[in-house]
Amino acid sequence: MVAAVGRIWRDGRRVERAAYVVGAVLFAGGLANAVVLLASGGTWLGPVSLRKAVTFGLSFGLTLATVAWATSYLTVRGRTVLLGAFLLACVTEVALVTMQAWRGVPSHFNFETGFDAAVSMTLAAGGGVIVLTGLGFTVAAFLSPGAMAPSQRLAVRFGLLVLMVALATGAVMIARGVGEARGGDPQLAYTTAGALKPLHAVAMHAILVLPGLAWLLRFTGLAERQRLRLVWLAVVADAVLTAVIGIEAFTGIPPFSAPAVYTGLSAVALAVLAGTVIFALFSALRGKESPDYFRASNP
């Protein structure tokens, strides 16, 4: 398995390696801000909390590296341009959010000064670039999937679809928030947009979990047919979890105050998803790489 990880780096194109390095830097920045926040005893709540620098750094760092790896299987023209644009947008989002957090002012829906308004609109534009590049990758996953085992192809396709749910949710959050802020009620903007955060967060990382699961299953010694079944199980579980969180978010139900049926569905889906990943991880540590391993085509 270690050799396969090294192969991901060696076989990667320049833009992919750049994305891995930048993703690691963004993630490390998020960790550094977490240390500062813990050491300073600052609040984890509110639009000016350093928490935003933490979550943006960690989340965008993971997402950038994961998208670079997962889409390396695709055979689509212009992928270097798409990934490069995605990389630059991720860096812009994290840098601006971190800057505003350290200045002690809100990063989003902040039109108090000309500079703050420019930052808010730049963040919105960066989000638009991320949505468009994500859409390009998702379409390519269905039209030009490249040489992948069926289990990996399913994981990449569904992971990108759920990523688009996260990005679309983020776009709705921004649209709602900007509307309320422009209407003179910035506090309502944060409250309205914040209600969709659980869906945005849960859907964001399916692109990490599902392709990662399919990749781990290659080292379990299981036949491809068995691996495909396990990936399907994880896909269904992730779909149920995302759907339940989405219903709660758009109907205004707090996740920790949801009806028992929603809580039960979420718990079961999360348990199944975690169970498949844990099984794959421990089995992979004892197994060896499947002979039907498909390298990324890196077009």
Image (spheres, helix red, strand yellow):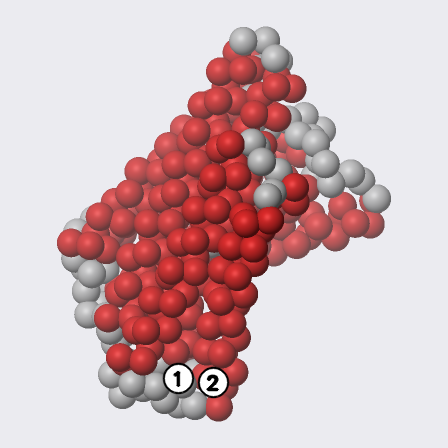
Left or right of residue 112: residue 160:
left
Sooner in the amino-acid sequence: mark 2 or mark 1: 1
Q: Quadrant of the N terminus?
A: bottom left
Q: Nearer the viewer, residue 37 or 188?
A: 188
Residue 272: horizontal and vertical position, in percent?
49, 67
Q: Amino acid at mark 1?
A: Phe
Element type at mark 2: helix
For image coordinates 29% across by 57% down, the residue present is 157
Residue 88 can be seen in this image: no
Left or right of residue 91: residue 82:
left
Q: Quadrant of residue 99?
A: top right
Residue bearing mark 1: 219
Residue 51 tag number: none
Residue bearing mark 2: 283
Element type at mark 1: loop
* Residue found at the very far top of the displayed protein: 184
Residue 229 can be seen in this image: yes
Residue 241: horizontal and vertical position, in percent?
47, 53
Left or right of residue 265: residue 45:
right
For image coordinates 54% across by 15% down, the residue present is 180
